[in-house]
Amino acid sequence: MINKKIIIAITGASGAIYADLLLNRLFQIKDQFETCAVVMSENARSVWNYELKKNIDTCIPFKIYDNSDFYAPFASGSSNFNTMIICPCSMGTLGRIASGTSSDLISRTADVMLKERKKLILVSREMPLNLIHINNMKIITEAGGIICPAAPSFYSCPETTEEILSTVIEKILNLADFEINSFRWG
């Protein structure tokens, strides 16, 4: 019986293509989870439109929740959602999570994941990092979250931009305990 319930949060960091590829890949493996919910920050919608030139509402195959909807099921620890991936994760969002500020659905849900000891994966998309970013990453890591920078690997000798970006998506899905066929070193 499949009991994986997953939340994908998309913030306004540059890198909407990572979120798009992640959602498409999740749709391909939808037999591995019960539910996938999506929540986007307001800035994420703007960045998505600017970078991808795609209509969000027609290209996301899962239910989208408003970032101010504190009645969304995953805003509570009793919901049994067990994995949250924030992709891409802005440093502002990361900072709010590190400080425990639950001012919107994304930061509230991340707080729920940490307090319930569920899987929280933050795909950071910023460089260079300042000491505040690094300290916030340390806090989240010590609280049980996983920081997974959107840094592609080249072991598989990717030949296209999508193949390069997909190395990050495969890493995210591996961290989230999905069964996927991905390149393995050695």
Image (tube, rainbow, N blue to C red):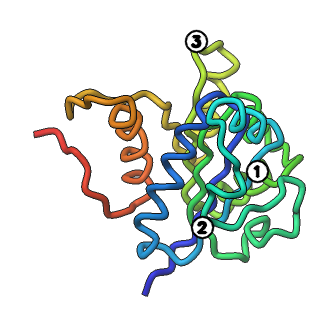
Q: Nearer the viewer, residue 172 or 110?
A: 172
Q: Is residue 47 above or below residue 177?
A: above
Query: Quadrant of residue 100 in the image?
Result: top right
Q: Secondary structure at mark 2?
A: strand
Query: In x, y percent, where is residue 93?
Result: 74, 36
Pointer 2 or 1: first along the chain: 2
Pointer 2 or 3: first along the chain: 2
Pointer 1 or 3: first along the chain: 1
Q: Is residue 54 above or below residue 62?
A: above
The residue singled out by tag 2 in the image is 36
Q: Secondary structure at mark 3?
A: loop
The residue singled out by tag 3 in the image is 128
What number of labels is visible?
A: 3
- Residue at image location 38% in from the left, 62% down from the top: 178
Image check: 159 left or right of 134? left
Query: In x, y percent, where is residue 138?
Result: 59, 31
Q: Is residue 128 above or below residue 23?
A: above
Give the position of the N terminus as an image quadrant. bottom left
Whole-Å distance between the Cαs marked 1 and 3?
Answer: 24 Å
Query: Quadrant of residue 31 in the image?
Result: bottom left
Q: Nearer the viewer, residue 172 or 65?
A: 65
Q: Is residue 98 above or below residue 127?
A: below
Give the position of the C terminus as an image quadrant. top left
Amino acid type, label 2: Cys
Amino acid type, label 1: Ile
Q: Nearer the viewer, mark 2 or mark 3?
A: 2
- Residue at image location 22% in from the left, 44% down from the top: 183
Dot label at residue 106: 1
Within-10-Å neighbours for mark 1: few <14, some 14–19, many 20+: many
Whole-Å distance between the Cαs marked 2 and 1?
Answer: 14 Å
